[in-house]
Image: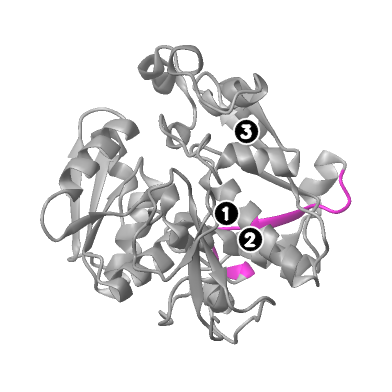
Amino acid sequence: MISMGDYQIQCTACGRLYPDTGSNECPDRHAALQRTVYSAQRLPCADLTGMMRFYDWLPVHNRPVVTAGPVTYKSEVFARELGLSHLYVTFNGFWPEKAAAIKTCSFKELEAVPTLARAAEKKSGILVVASAGNTGRAFAQVAAGMNTPVVVVVPKKSLPRIWTTVPADTVLLITVEGDYSDAISMSNYIADLPHLTAEGGAKNCARRDGMGTVMLDGATTIGRIPDYYVQAVGSGTGAIAAWEASQRLVRDGRFGHHLPRMVLSQNHPFIPMANAWNAGRREIDPMTDMADATQAISEVYADVLTNRNPPYGITGGLFDCLTETGGEIAAVRNDEARRAQT
């Protein structure tokens, strides 16, 4: 029996439930994402600021004081441009007029808060985080606010993206030559040193549940689970998080009984998940889907969306998410992105 306010971890491959030790792996070593199973079947919205409103569906016991949180509003002007009448935007950034207070202007702050809090509670060691920019900036900001140490590894070209609004004396920043994948390789090497531990990326349930608050805020604002969920993806972790949050909302019963259709996009020419999905394959074929990856990554408009090892085929990953929701991934060219931005 799980007590109120508590949770357990469940392997998406074998279904085994076990206490949270801070690990991101199944005790039986299944290659699968590990999910949280919360005692609160219905979503209670606490009288707290930011994302901590959804504290009961976050894998932490302490309640860090944060202002960061998603803010959902009904679009009018943009909706009119698109010819839509029921378009909602969940904004993740800094917009005081909308009471939006994500100071790094990235929804990666929603990942950083519960991930750092969970690591501190489980005494997991100093986290090592790899990033193309946004994640590193978010973890640096949150670690500084919590006065907890973190190691951030980024490509040298991403250095201008790493800044905080408060002094970050607890952050060790390391730059590497190369792209995001090179930063990941270096972070894995560093994480093997004593007292350090790999943050886990998509495998970390705290990161996914933190991002899942986007769906929770959307559903509680709209009054029901949305019909579609639209997002550009690099790893697809945000979409997986929205899918998992939607499953919990369905079990809640007050927000509808359907899952939103995932409408995702990748930036051409680096589109490994779009290639694999549209070819009907569970696994990404490096020779087919990522031919000359270095060149392709150098050409994309949104280089933060370039992950060579996304959680696509793993059990509980993006392939399963798209399959269950009837989703799709489109390839967006640079000129299309620039035209849409204009």
Query: Hey, what amino acid is under mark 3?
Result: Ser
Q: Which residues are magenta?
A: 84-98
Label 2 vs label 3, nearer the camera: 2
Residue at position x 14%, y 61% in the image: 195
Which dot marks residue 265?
Answer: 3
Residue 337: x %, y % from top left:
61, 29
- Asked if residue 268 lies left or right of residue 184, the reply is right
Q: Position of residue 220 (x, y in %)?
A: 73, 70
| Residue 281 or residue 107, whichever sits in front | 281
Q: Are marks 1 and 3 in contact (CB under 8 Å)?
A: no
Residue matched to label 1 = 241
In the figure, residue 194 lies in which quadrant?
bottom left
User: Mark 1: which secondary structure?
Assistant: helix
Task: Give the class, few, some or many, for how many residues have Cα within 10 Å of label 1's Cα (few <14, many ≥20).
Answer: many
In the image, farthest residue toward the left: 194
Q: Which residue is mark 2?
A: 245
Instruction: Report the residue at 66% width, 23% height from top.
Output: 280
**Residue 93 shows in this picture:** no
**Three-letter residue code for mark 1:** Ala
Marked residue nearer the N-terminal end (1 or 3): 1
Tell me the SS state at disc 2.
helix
Distance, label 2 to label 1, CA atoms, is 6 Å
**Residue at left offset 66%, top offset 67%:** 217
* Frontmost residue, 164 versus 307: 307
Inspect this view and state whether residue 226 appears: yes
Cα separation between marks 2 and 3: 20 Å
Q: Nearer the viewer, residue 328 or 178?
A: 328
For the rendered model, the colour scheme is one colour
The Cα–Cα distance between marks 1 and 3, rounded to whole angstroms, is 16 Å
Specify the amino acid type for callout 2. Answer: Ala
Image quarter in which the C terminus is found:
top right
